[in-house]
Amino acid sequence: MRYTVISRVICASLAFCQLLLGFASGQSLEYVVGPQDVLRVYIFDHPELSTDAVVSADGYVFLPLVGAVSVGDLTIREVEGVLTEAFGSYIVDPKVTVGLAMETRKRVYVIGQVRRPGAYPYVEGGRLSDYLGQAGGFDGGADIRRTRITRLSSEGWLVYYIDVDRIYEQGRRDLDIEMEADDTVFVPETLASRIRWWLPVVGFGVGIVTTFIVWRARR
């Protein structure tokens, strides 16, 4: 029994780590590039072309060999595609990797059950619905009635729970609050969605335990 419990804990821990790694990777690639951001551009097997590049006010980076390339308002993933195409005019099958070396702009973070979780440029006067729209709307299984906004104020952390359904269905503009720089919007899953996710895991665990019990009984 003790070994069964330990195995379950290990499996759950590994699964959680995988989720965190996947989320972190996705967040980095979905970051929207803007003026004054510093991009780290790496061209495999061409160190002379690899460099850090500052995004100009009009959304361009200036790179060796290819010159000026427009990257403003693109995600990191999209920038990789654009630069791969640009360097492809001079290099055979270029392998381009782009990362964020330095972020200088203020952001609003939208995570959870949305189609494009990530960090979005803060715009003064921008409302909750604006950022949810930039994040592509909701995934299936989103519990939009319990959308949470976390904000750091001079008094400490503040947490707001917003029923987004009332914003869209009833036009409740008073609930569509103005966002502040560094706010985090979290859209949770519904209980039904969480249960559906865990059922296969539980079933797999039960199968392993049953197999072990049968094996022990036959010894």
Image (cartoon, grey):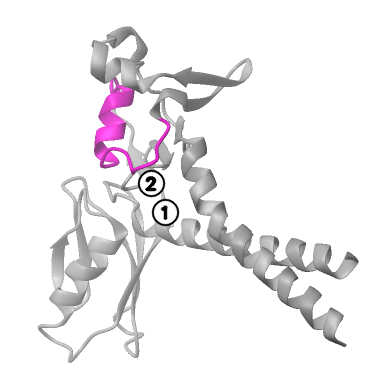
- Residue drawn at the location 61% of the way across and 67% of the way down: 204
Category of crowding for the residue at label 2, using alpha-carbon neighbours closer than 10 angstroms: few (below 14), some (14–19), many (at least 20): many
Image vertical order of residue 13 relative to residue 191, above or below: below
- Three-letter code for the amino acid on which mark 1 is drawn: Gln
Looking at the image, do the residues carrying marks 2 and 1 touch, with CB atoms under 8 Å apart?
Answer: yes
Residue depicted at 29% across the width and 83% down the height: 95
Question: From the image, which quarter does the N terminus lie in?
Answer: bottom right
**Can residue 7 be seen from the camera position used here?**
yes
Name the one closer to the observer, 33 or 5.
5
Q: Residue 118 bears which disc, if any? A: 2
What residue is shown with label 1?
27
Chain-order first, disc 2 or disc 1: 1
In this rendering, would 2 be left or right of 171?
Answer: right
Give percent across and percent down for residue 86: 14, 75
The span shown in magenta is 124-143
Extreme-left residue of the structure = 89
Tell me which amino acid carries mark 2. Answer: Gly
Q: Is residue 56 left or right of residue 20?
A: left
Secondary structure under tag 2 reads strand
Name the residue at 52% across, 44% down.
194
Q: Splitting the image into 4 quarters, where does residue 104 fall? A: top left
Does 61 sit above or below residue 168? below
